């Protein structure tokens, strides 16, 4: 085995890999991020940074930086408009897609944001560069890894010089996308439904297009005419747009000249369109057979692929990074047992199963399915047809764009490190309806404590104990003493009776670093932190040597 140079090596500098590096870097864990390209942010890909991801960014201190990168301003309306063609008839309008409107909401501290993924990666990469314990290298390809009980040897190759080197680390994480070489290396495969649809993502420049159509500003427009069923919308400043024809036949290949013709046909607007990039993509619903092998882990697209309808894929990868990141830090720094890492897969797999099923359901209704021959007819008959189709669209598609239950309400119901108590685990919220709950496994309910101060702002890097006014001081001190004994950071947060209300009915609620509730009760129960940090199934804590990462 190579000498250990890093605590963690991360393969892939997309949003998942960069988020993991930030989660580790904020805790002082030294890690290396390896990227095969010469920079991040090549493809447009995702455009929705949801409220949960921006809440993580708030915790990292960079949510405002992302807002400043909004190409059309953070106030740009994130509406989804359904039309026959961009230059044609209006069918339906769904407002405030993914809760991007920058307004105060009691359920979360940060609104969503409609922004190209390459700008998200830019903000993340710039923050990584500010973290002294994190290093990033480009033009470097992962070639394989070997592991034993003490660490991992990672083989890398410089793509410019061809030079090879081997470095040692305690843990390796593959955040290297849908074609993950790390996944192949641990013998895992992807299972599920391949090839749900073939689609294209075309980026083009079109000066004057925003003014040439009658439907007002929006994040995207679904064009339903059978000439070219598609999505289209503004992507960046400088009149840069995206165009996405959906559910194409197997044998279709679109050249740049054909793309121009297709955009003209789809929009009904004749302008000089300049094609900037064009690539085919296939919608899949897949999950890896395993998320880990001893000291090697998978995160993001390397272990799950969602159809991108609902905007969950990138955001779910960031949440993978947060879950895995604090657990790796806990083990490496000695306040978590190695068994803590065994909770990563059961927690995240369950959530991915639920979200993939939802994304698949969204994918069953595309622009291709929202047409009837009288939708562009003039007069009352055409108006009636469009009104009827509009109602049909809202009934089918509103849940795709207003999925607060999915974003905030998915709870960990089968985690080995969560103490569920007599009430058991909570059934996950429906896709649309979010009902805040402080039952163990759920995301801790949000509270505004002042005009700008969120309850989450007081949680810190470690665990947080949320106390009702009637919580006993001896119980609070007992929890604090247990945290000190284990070397675990703990913040004590006192709520007023009005603040706690029905959201935090138990006298004490313990929240872990990823803001999920791990336990609640009327008095402190010895051993809760043991279980939350993986020690109950391993060695008893208390001896410094027993808790050191190997």
Image (cartoon, rainbow, N blue to C red):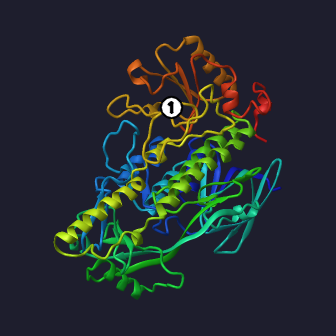
* Residue 90 in sight here: yes
Image spot of residue 335 (x, y percent): 69, 33
Please tell me whether residue 322 is drawn above or below residue 508 in the rendered image.
below
Tell me which corner region of the image, top left, top right, bottom left or bottom right, holds residue 240. Answer: bottom left
Residue at the limit of the structure toward the front, as seen here: 381
At horizontal 73% and vertical 60% (from top left) the residue drawn is 188
At horizontal 53% and vertical 66% (from top left) the residue drawn is 39
In the rendered view, does 149 fall on the left or right side of 239?
A: right
In the rendered view, does 515 fall on the left or right side of 36?
A: left
Residue at the limit of the structure toward the left, as seen here: 379
Please tell me whether residue 117 is drawn above or below residue 111 in the rendered image.
below
Image spot of residue 294 (x, y percent): 77, 50
Q: Closer to the camera, 528 or 115?
A: 528
Tell me which corner region of the image, top left, top right, bottom left or bottom right, holds residue 285. Answer: bottom right
SS for callout 1: loop
Q: Closer to the camera, 115 or 164?
A: 115
Tell me which corner region of the image, top left, top right, bottom left or bottom right, holds residue 544. Answer: top right
Quadrant that contains the C terminus: top right
Label total for image: 1
Image spot of residue 480 (x, y percent): 61, 20
Q: Closer to the camera, 152 or 256?
A: 256
Decide: few, some or many residues near mark 1? Use Cα within 10 Å; few <14, some 14-19, many ≥20. Answer: many
Quadrant that contains the N terminus: bottom right
Residue ID for mark 1: 459
Image spot of residue 434 (x, y percent): 44, 41
Residue at the limit of the structure toward the bottom, as seen here: 257
* Residue 21 in sight here: no
């Amino acid at each position: 085995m190579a000498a250990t140079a890093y605590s963690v090596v991360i393969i892939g500098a997309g949003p998942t890999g960069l988020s993991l590096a930030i989660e580790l870097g904020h805790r002082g864990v030294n890690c290396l991020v390896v990227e095969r390209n010469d920079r991040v942010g090549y493809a447009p890909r995702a455009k929705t940074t949801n409220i949960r991801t921006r809440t993580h960014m708030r915790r990292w201190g960079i949510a405002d930086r992302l807002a400043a990168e909004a190409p059309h301003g953070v106030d740009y309306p994130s509406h989804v408009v359904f039309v026959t063609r961009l230059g044609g008839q209006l069918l339906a309008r769904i407002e405030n897609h993914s809760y991007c409107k920058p307004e105060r909401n009691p359920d979360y501290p940060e609104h969503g944001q409609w922004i190209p993924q390459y700008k998200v990666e830019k903000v993340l990469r710039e923050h990584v560069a500010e973290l002294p314990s994190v290093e990033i290298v480009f033009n470097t390809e992962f070639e394989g890894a070997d592991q034993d009980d003490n660490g991992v040897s990672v083989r890398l190759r410089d793509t410019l010089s061809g030079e090879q080197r081997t470095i040692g680390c305690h843990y390796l994480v593959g955040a290297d996308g849908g074609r993950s070489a790390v996944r192949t290396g641990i013998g895992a495969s992807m299972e599920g439904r391949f090839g749900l649809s073939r689609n294209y993502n075309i980026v083009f420049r079109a000066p004057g297009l925003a003014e040439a159509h009658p439907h007002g500003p929006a994040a995207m427009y679904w064009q339903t005419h059978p000439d070219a069923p598609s999505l289209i919308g503004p992507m960046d400043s400088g009149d840069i747009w995206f165009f996405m024809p959906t559910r194409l036949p197997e044998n279709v290949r679109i050249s740049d000249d054909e793309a121009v013709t297709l955009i003209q046909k789809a929009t009904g607007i004749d302008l000089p369109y300049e094609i900037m990039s064009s690539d085919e993509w296939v919608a899949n619903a897949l999950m890896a057979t395993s998320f880990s092998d001893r000291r090697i882990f998978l995160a993001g697209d390397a272990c799950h692929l969602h159809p991108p309808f609902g905007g969950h894929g990138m955001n779910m990868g960031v949440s993978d990074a947060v879950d895995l990141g604090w657990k790796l830090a806990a083990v490496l720094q000695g306040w978590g047992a190695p068994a803590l890492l065994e909770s990563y897969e059961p927690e995240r797999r369950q959530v991915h199963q639920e979200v993939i099923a939802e994304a698949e359901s969204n994918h069953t209704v595309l622009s291709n399915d929202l047409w009837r021959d009288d939708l562009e007819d003039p007069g009352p008959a055409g108006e009636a047809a469009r009104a009827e189709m509009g109602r049909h669209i809202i009934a089918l598609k509103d849940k795709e764009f207003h999925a607060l239950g999915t974003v905030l309400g998915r709870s960990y119901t089968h985690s080995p490190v969560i103490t569920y108590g007599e009430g058991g685990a909570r059934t996950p919220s429906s896709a649309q309806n979010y009902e805040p709950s402080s039952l163990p496994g759920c995301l801790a309910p949000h509270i505004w404590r002042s005009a700008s101060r969120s309850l989450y702002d007081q949680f810190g890097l470690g665990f947080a104990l949320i106390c009702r006014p009637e919580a006993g001081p001896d119980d609070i001190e007992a929890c604090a003493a247990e945290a000190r004994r284990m070397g675990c950071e703990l913040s004590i947060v006192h709520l007023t009776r009005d603040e706690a209300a029905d959201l935090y009915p138990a006298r004490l609620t313990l929240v872990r670093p990823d803001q999920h509730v791990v336990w609640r009760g009327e008095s402190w129960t010895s051993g809760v932190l043991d279980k939350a940090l993986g020690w109950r199934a391993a060695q008893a804590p208390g001896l410094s040597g027993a808790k050191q990462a190997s």
